[in-house]
Amino acid sequence: MSAALSAEPPPRKPRARKTKPAAPIAPPGPRLVNKRDLCREAGISRTTLDECLARDPAFPIVKRGGGNGDGWKFNAELAVARLAELLARTEKDLSPNQRFMELRARDLERKQAIEAGGLLIAEQMRGALARGLTALRRELTSGVPVKAGKLMGLSKDQQRILRGLIEDELRAFVAGLEQTGLPDADG
């Protein structure tokens, strides 16, 4: 075998491939929805949507359709935000029946929150706080000075001074509560 055949062939240079320049990536467009999907996202009826479209010439419509509503295209984010603006009601806009129904709904929510333990009745809370603060005051003004006297070897005069400091702090606490303007925040 000749030396030329036994030698490895010279390494090949890879061919330079012609590449097309990458097309610029366009930012994603708005998410488009039809009437049915818009009603579902906004939590409204088709009738309500149609009324809003009739009342608002500036409603953000991408494409008007005909027929059963599938031809319509809306920018989902803009359309839902616009519907929220259009449907925001103030109490003066409500009829007496609507106000009554809203009050019933709030009352039902309140009762459910009380039953679930997520809402406390003010009178019950006041009583619990009064009992707790009374017990805390008793312990701070009587128990703490005596315990401190035993632990730190305080004399009776030093215990009396400590009791006076604690009472001054409690009075300042009550005065701070009175300044909040909360009802029943008096000493």
Image (cartoon, rainbow, N blue to C red):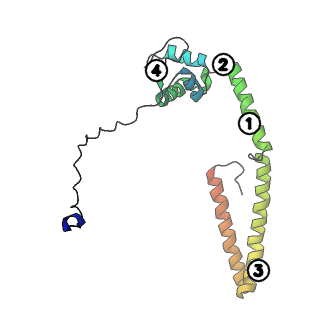
- Which residue appears at 53% of the width and 23% of the height? 86
Residue placed most toward the observer, 94 or 3:
3
Nearer the viewer's eye, disc 1 or disc 3? Answer: 1
What kind of residue is marked 4? Phe
Most distant residue in the top direction: 67
Q: How far apart are marks 3 and 2 (CA)?
A: 66 Å
Q: In which quarter of the image is the N terminus?
A: bottom left
Task: Return the residue at label 1.
Answer: 109
Horizontally, residue 165 falls left or right of residue 29, namely: right
Q: Where is residue 173 in the image (x, y as percent from the top left)?
A: 65, 62
Residue 133 is at least partly visible in this image = yes
Task: Return the residue at label 3.
Answer: 146
Q: How far apart are marks 1 and 3 (CA)?
A: 49 Å
N-terminal-most mark, 1 or 3: 1
Residue placed most toward the observer, 160 or 89:
89
Q: Is mark 3 on a helix, strand or loop?
A: helix
Task: Return the residue at label 2.
Answer: 95
Q: Distance between the residues labelled 2 and 1?
A: 21 Å
Q: What element carries label 1?
A: helix
How busy is the neighbourhood of tag 2: few (under 14 within 10 Å), some, or many (20 plus)?
A: few
- Which residue appears at 52% of the width and 22% of the height? 34
Q: Quadrant of residue 187?
A: bottom right
Q: How far apart are marks 4 and 3 (CA)?
A: 74 Å
Instruction: Relative to 129, say whether 19 is above or below.
Output: above
Residue placed most toward the observer, 70 or 78:
70
Q: Is mark 4 on a helix, strand or loop?
A: loop
N-terminal-most mark, 4 or 3: 4
N-terminal-most mark, 2 or 1: 2
Q: How far apart are marks 1 and 4 (CA)?
A: 34 Å
- Which residue appears at 51% of the width and 16% of the height? 53
Task: Return the residue at label 4.
Answer: 59
Horizontally, residue 28 falls left or right of residue 139, namely: left
